[in-house]
Image (cartoon, grey):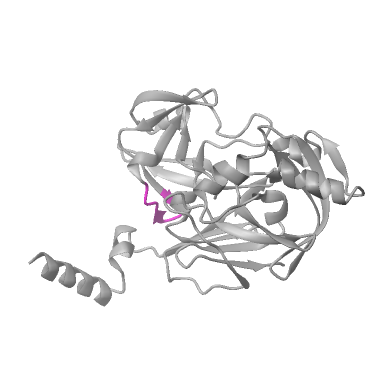
Amino acid sequence: MMSRLLFLASLVAALLGCTPRQERMGGVAQVTVPLLVEGNRPFVDVTFHKADGSKSTARFLVDSGGGSFLLAEPLARDLGLEWGETHREEGQEFATVMAPPTAFVGDLQLELNPKRVVVMIGAESILPKVAPGHAEGMFPGHLLAHYHVVFDYPQGSFTLALPGVLTPRGEALPMPVSKPQGFPRTEIEVDGERRGFLVDTGASFTMVSEVLLKSWGDKHTDWPRHTGAVGEAATLGGMTLETMTVPSARWGTRELHAFGVTSQREGTFERYMSGMMAAPIVGSLAGNVLKQFRVELDYPNEKLYLSAP
């Protein structure tokens, strides 16, 4: 009986031109909304439907390397959310909500995992204090992984689509996606060697292991190299050991001209982050490089499509 009901439900959905998933999303298969880029980071507006029937809109950082659907405490309170015990990570207090909010990008309702909706206690913004701008929440990797996503940095637009809806455009590159984190991996070629990187939209500046930066510096003493964070790297937050300018690299067939990288302590990428990826990485490719391109992430098919203006 249950199988017959499921079959009939699928048949009716097909006749109406909607998949069961589209029905859950209100019949909306894709949306395109403005993408605001500030300090090399991408932001979109997320709209919440509150219990009293009103709506609230908040600015969210779209972070392909982020772990939770994160809300600053004032936003969580405005939405009437409740949470239980708190825990601390790296000096910050967090709590998981009792029940998730109803959230939309444009007219597309987001498929939130109740266990991964987290409140950042005592925080007005989820961004590092050194970062420009303000964000009341974070749209993370595991949520992006439900969709086919387009970050059109040059045109200032963000597209979110259900699987199979969009026709991809641009140069196709492999993009293994880790489960359940939803972290996308790509490779770039520097100094004749291909290396794995996290595609990290939430970071303002590209990062590598201190071991890799040191090896580049020892081999190429003419590559500009400075202690600590220099220029845009200062907006990154966290521990920065050195800043270097890499004169050129290749991402697929695209030439990457002089771009900056910072170094993180040995093991950050080689052990900790690689353990959450589909394959090992040595760094994360971030906004200072990504903002030059239209970056299309087809998560279901594990493909990245790259194009430039």
Q: Is residue 124 left or right of residue 189?
A: left
Magenta extent: 104-112
Residue 141, placed above or below residue 21: above
Q: Residue at x 54, y 56 (%)?
A: 279
Kindly tell me whether residue 187 is visible in this rendering.
yes
Picture quarter containing residue 132?
top right
Which x, y percent locates residue 120? 47, 29
Q: Is residue 226 left or right of residue 207?
A: right
Kindly tell me whether residue 63 is visible in this rendering.
no
Q: Is residue 130 magenta?
A: no
Which x, y percent locates residue 62? 55, 48
Which x, y percent locates residue 18? 31, 70
- Residue 288 or 87: which is nearer the viewer? 87
Q: Residue furthest bottom?
A: 15
- Residue 128 or 175: which is nearer the viewer? 175
Q: Residue at x 51, y 74 (%)?
A: 167
Q: How many marks?
A: 0
- Residue 222 or 302: which is nearer the viewer? 222
Q: Is residue 220 left or right of residue 271?
A: right
Q: Is residue 106 magenta?
A: yes
Q: Residue furthest right?
A: 222
Q: Is residue 96 left or right of residue 212?
A: left
Picture quarter containing residue 7?
bottom left
Q: Residue at x 73, y 41 (%)?
A: 210
Quarter of the image for the C terminus: give it.
Answer: bottom right
